[in-house]
């Protein structure tokens, strides 16, 4: 890309402001930002929004493409490319693909499958097949006997940038209400009441035997390898204190206002699901993301299981006073997650930053992606 490209007549949303103007990009970077008429027409946005490319820290949507049906394993690189198409089509230019080890089901192992997916991500990136930039986020279920063994092969993978420490034991964290656990997993597995009760007892026994030691080992390994850590489903002040003591940087999906506020106060970036915003609440009956936004303790949104929810969720929160308008809402899906992950070269429209940019039309009342650029190259 030898010649500069001008995006003109756009509603530009920076990290702090919103204005009509233009942006000039050259060699993959933003080199000029101005208000009003551009020095030359370039690409006329016709009043559409020019936003930073979205940064997604936690999506397990790749698994949907890799295992589209029970016991069906799709070719891994094909699954990555199908996922990539949906991600970039949602305006996400940087994505952390969440791969799980020490899974939260019974009688299944996912470590080898997830390693195969990580290798497919690396292969697709190596051949320049992906349009978004992909990293790996490892989700470690501590109430599983072999989670430490399964996560260790990932520690030398340069794509690994984030590890979350999870515990989906019935009666814990996200599923403090055991009935919610039963409803969620019975729907997935079609189990009877007696089978669910037997699984609950077994899962609790495994948790009692392994969870504490597994958590300590995972935290120690990540700290020794310089991998960013995230807590998951913190519900109490004790959970937050534990996360702070373990050097966590991100608090994923806290289940109460109390835990979210304490995490935010302690400097952890509070991450909530954009589907929670779009649906108007948590599918598990926990605190709503909008309530945390109104309290001023929401830092990051994640699309979680619906890629298109990220852009929708940000626009939906723009009317929350504590957000500070659309610039503050867009920070939830761009600058804040990028900073939380240590990716300070992207996530905002600012001089010298990567030209990861998206064109969005919101004339219909719903944000619609019209185009996406990654490092100045059109990718959608």
Image (tube, rainbow, N blue to C red):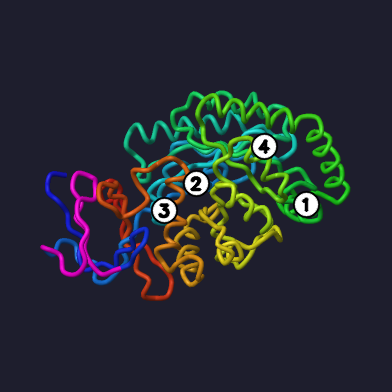
Q: Secondary structure at mark 2?
A: strand
Cα–Cα gap, marks 3 and 2? 10 Å
C-alpha span from label 3 to label 4: 27 Å
Instruction: Please state the total of marks drawn on the protein image.
Output: 4
Which residue is tagged 4? 141
Q: Residue furthest right?
A: 194
Say whether disc 4 or disc 2 marks the residue closer to the N-terminus.
2
Q: Please give the residue where the numbered disc 1 appears in the rendered image.
A: 176
Residue 324 vs 26, above or below: the answer is below
Task: Give the camera-side residue of 72 and 270.
Answer: 270
Q: CA distance from mark 1 to mark 3?
A: 32 Å
Mark 3 vs 2: CB contact within 8 A? no
State the mark number for residue 57.
Answer: 2
- Image coordinates of residue 232 in percent, x first then y, are 64, 45
Spatial CA distance of label 2 from label 1 is 25 Å
Mark 3 vs 2, N-terminal side:
2
Q: Which residue is mark 3?
A: 334
The answer to whether residue 174 of the structure is visible from this angle is: yes
- Magenta segment, which residues? 19-39
Q: Is residue 187 left or right of residue 97?
A: right
Using a 10 Å C-alpha cutoff, classify the residue at mark 2 as few (fewer than 14 neighbours), some (14 to 19) or many (20 or more).
many
Q: Position of residue 123 (x, y in %)?
A: 40, 31
Tell me, yes or no, whether the highlighted magenta stretch contains residue 32.
yes
């Amino acid at each position: 890309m030898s010649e500069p490209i001008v995006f003109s007549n756009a509603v530009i949303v920076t990290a702090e402001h919103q204005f009509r103007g233009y942006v000039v990009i050259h060699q993959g970077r933003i080199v000029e930002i101005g208000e009003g008429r551009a020095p030359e027409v370039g690409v006329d946005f016709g009043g559409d929004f020019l936003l930073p490319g979205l940064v997604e820290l936690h999506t397990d949507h790749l698994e949907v493409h890799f295992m589209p049906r029970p016991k069906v394993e799709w070719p891994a690189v094909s699954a990555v490319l199908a996922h990539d198409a949906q991600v970039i089509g949602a305006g996400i230019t940087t994505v952390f693909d969440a791969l799980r080890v020490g899974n939260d089901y019974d009688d299944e192992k996912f470590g080898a499958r997830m390693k195969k997916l990580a290798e497919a991500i690396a292969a697709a990136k190596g051949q320049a097949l992906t349009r978004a930039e992909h990293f790996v986020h490892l989700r470690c279920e501590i109430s599983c006997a072999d989670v430490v063994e399964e996560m260790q092969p990932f520690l030398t993978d340069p794509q690994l940038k984030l590890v979350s420490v999870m515990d989906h034991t019935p009666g814990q964290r996200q599923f403090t209400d055991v009935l919610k656990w039963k409803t969620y997993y019975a729907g997935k597995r079609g189990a009877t009441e007696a089978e669910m009760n037997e699984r609950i007892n077994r899962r609790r026994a495994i948790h009692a035997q392994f969870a504490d030691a597994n958590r300590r080992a995972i935290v120690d390994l990540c700290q020794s390898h310089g991998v960013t850590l995230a807590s998951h489903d913190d519900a109490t002040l004790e959970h937050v204190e534990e996360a702070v003591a373990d050097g966590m940087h991100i608090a994923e999906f806290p289940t109460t206002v109390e835990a979210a506020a304490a995490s935010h106060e302690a400097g952890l970036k509070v991450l909530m699901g954009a589907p929670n915003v779009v649906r108007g609440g948590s599918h598990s009956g926990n605190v709503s993301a909008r309530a945390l936004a109104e309290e001023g303790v929401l830092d990051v949104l994640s699309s979680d299981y619906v890629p298109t929810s990220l852009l929708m969720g940000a626009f939906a929160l723009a009317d929350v006073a504590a957000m500070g308008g659309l610039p503050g809402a867009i920070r939830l899906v761009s600058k804040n997650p990028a900073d939380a992950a240590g990716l300070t070269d992207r996530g905002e429209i600012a001089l010298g930053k990567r030209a990861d940019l998206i064109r969005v039309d919101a004339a219909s009342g719903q944000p619609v992606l019209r185009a996406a650029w990654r490092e100045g190259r059109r990718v959608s």
